[in-house]
Image: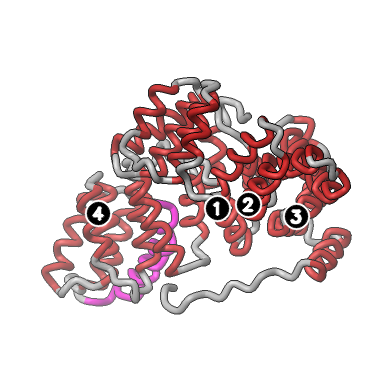
């Protein structure tokens, strides 16, 4: 279980911090600022009211935190020409700097998907929404930014922060894997990736953040489910049920949480009744059904249910060990031999991640090589490749790392991700 200080710091380590920049112009807009410098030089000889020159001056004013002056320049641009995409982008930046989130988002929404400014506009709007705790809206905007520009690393980092707070592991893994394809992940990024595969936050640490998300947006289902599970792990069963109350009874994830609450309370009979109401092929419900079947020593049922859970997520520790126990209960331990190897690989990976959280583990000169091997053995292919890429980034002349990556890519060719048309 992650320590109290790791919860938000881990997600922020992947997705970027939030404190101290609530309404600051995001660093991702640095490219726009640099373009403004070039534009200023190019247009310096033009007339004082040239809108392109005014735009460059406004960007320069924003960089120097002269927000009011940037706003006045923007008004002069608006008087000189119909608004262009770059003008809406500038207005969004100005309103962010003024601390006007609604006005900023409205301006940024004027930029169409076909514009080269669209990915950055969606990113900025997503950041604005996240900083006022509207995680659901932020996620939608960040996913739009990624759709328009799959190479936009900052949008993925911001999305990872949200997914990390809500412990949506499968989506977290997908985003980390995609991020590793567009940038070299640093040690902390890769450590967080591994940590998020199996850790549970200290529930008291993230309760405030999730509560803020839900207060800002009561329709945020992901935050509602995460907060309910958080309360359950704190032993606050009534509070967890209260958070879940608005969720329909037939929602599989909410149903799984309600079953977990009953199991925690040792109300197995009621838990069984609820489990019968859920869809038969839902992986989380299947895991709970398998757990219940093992408690009844029903090996056949346990095997059937844990297979469903395992097929959905072969790296799920509960599914792997559940299958092993089911085979043993059926008197077929030989069929569990491959699963035992998988379980050993998962345990070795988790042990290594725990060692990385200690000063001694981080000081191990071979820790990157060990991490790559542990990931490969556990079947975490993109993760293993990312560790090898880090080794080469740290020392481009490391022949052993270069050879290891070459052999690894021969055995596990990288998946090709075609970039969609449009965007930057």
Spatial separation of the CA atoms under disc 1 and disc 4: 44 Å
Q: Helix, strand or loop at disc 4?
A: helix
Graded by Cα atoms within 10 Å as few (under 14), some (14 to 19) or many (20 or more), the crowding at tag 2 reads many
Tell me which residue sits at (41%, 28%) in the image.
Answer: 240
- Residue hosting label 4: 104
Q: Are marks 2 and 3 in contact (CB under 8 Å)?
A: no
| In this rendering, the label closer to the viewer, 4 or 2 | 2
- Residue hosting label 2: 308
* 45 within the magenta span: yes
Q: Which label's residue is closer to the chain start, 1 or 3?
A: 1
Q: Are marks 1 and 3 in contact (CB under 8 Å)?
A: no
Residue 33 % position (x, y): 38, 61
Spatial separation of the CA atoms under disc 2 and disc 3: 19 Å
Query: Bounds of the magenta span?
Result: 25-46
Spatial separation of the CA atoms under disc 4 and disc 2: 46 Å
Q: Which label is found at residue 281?
A: 1
Q: Are marks 1 and 2 in contact (CB under 8 Å)?
A: yes
Residue 120 % position (x, y): 39, 63
Colour scheme in the image? Answer: secondary structure
Front-most of residues 239 and 278: 278
Q: What is the quadrant of residue 1 in the picture?
A: top right
Which quadrant: the C terminus?
Answer: bottom left
Q: Which label's residue is closer to the chain start, 2 or 3?
A: 2
Q: Helix, strand or loop at disc 1?
A: loop
- Residue hosting label 3: 379
Residue 209 % position (x, y): 41, 33
Spatial separation of the CA atoms under disc 1 and disc 3: 24 Å
């Amino acid at each position: 279980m992650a320590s109290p200080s790791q919860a938000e710091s881990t997600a922020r380590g992947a997705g970027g911090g939030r404190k101290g920049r609530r309404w600051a112009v995001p660093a991702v807009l640095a490219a726009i600022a640099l373009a403004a410098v070039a534009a200023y030089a190019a247009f310096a000889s033009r007339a004082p009211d040239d809108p392109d020159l005014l735009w460059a001056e406004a960007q320069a004013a924003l960089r120097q935190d002269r927000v009011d002056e940037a706003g006045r320049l923007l008004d002069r641009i608006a008087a000189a020409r119909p608004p262009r995409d770059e003008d809406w982008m500038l207005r969004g930046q100005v309103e962010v700097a003024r601390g006007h989130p609604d006005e900023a988002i409205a301006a940024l929404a004027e930029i169409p998907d076909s514009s080269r400014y669209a990915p950055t506009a969606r990113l900025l709007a997503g950041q604005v929404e996240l900083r006022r705790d509207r995680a659901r809206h932020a996620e939608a905007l960040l996913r739009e930014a990624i759709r328009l520009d799959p190479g936009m690393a900052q949008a993925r980092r911001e999305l990872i922060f949200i997914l990390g707070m809500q412990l949506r592991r499968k989506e977290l893994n997908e985003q980390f894997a995609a991020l590793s394809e567009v940038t070299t992940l640093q040690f902390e990024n890769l450590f967080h990736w591994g940590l998020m595969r199996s850790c549970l936050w200290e529930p008291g640490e993230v309760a405030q953040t999730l509560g803020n998300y839900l207060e800002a947006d009561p329709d945020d289902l992901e935050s509602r489910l995460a907060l309910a599970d958080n309360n359950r792990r704190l032993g606050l069963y009534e509070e967890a049920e209260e958070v879940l109350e608005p969720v329909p009874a037939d929602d599989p994830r909410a149903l799984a949480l309600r079953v977990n609450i009953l199991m925690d309370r040792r109300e197995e009979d009621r838990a069984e009744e609820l489990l019968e109401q859920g869809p038969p092929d839902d992986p989380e419900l299947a895991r709970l059904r398998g757990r219940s079947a093992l408690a009844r020593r029903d090996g056949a049922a346990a095997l059937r249910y844990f297979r469903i859970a395992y097929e959905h997520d072969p790296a799920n520790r509960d599914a792997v060990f559940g299958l092993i126990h089911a085979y043993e209960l059926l008197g077929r331990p030989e069929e569990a031999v491959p699963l035992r190897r998988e379980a050993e690989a998962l345990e070795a990976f988790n042990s290594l991640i725990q060692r990385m959280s200690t000063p001694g583990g981080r000081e191990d000169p071979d820790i990157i090589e060990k991490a790559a091997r542990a990931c490969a053995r556990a079947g975490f292919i993109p993760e293993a490749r990312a560790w090898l890429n880090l080794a080469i980034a740290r020392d481009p002349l490391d022949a052993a790392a270069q050879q290891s990556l070459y052999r690894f890519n021969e055995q596990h060719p990288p998946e090709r991700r075609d970039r969609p048309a449009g965007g930057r």
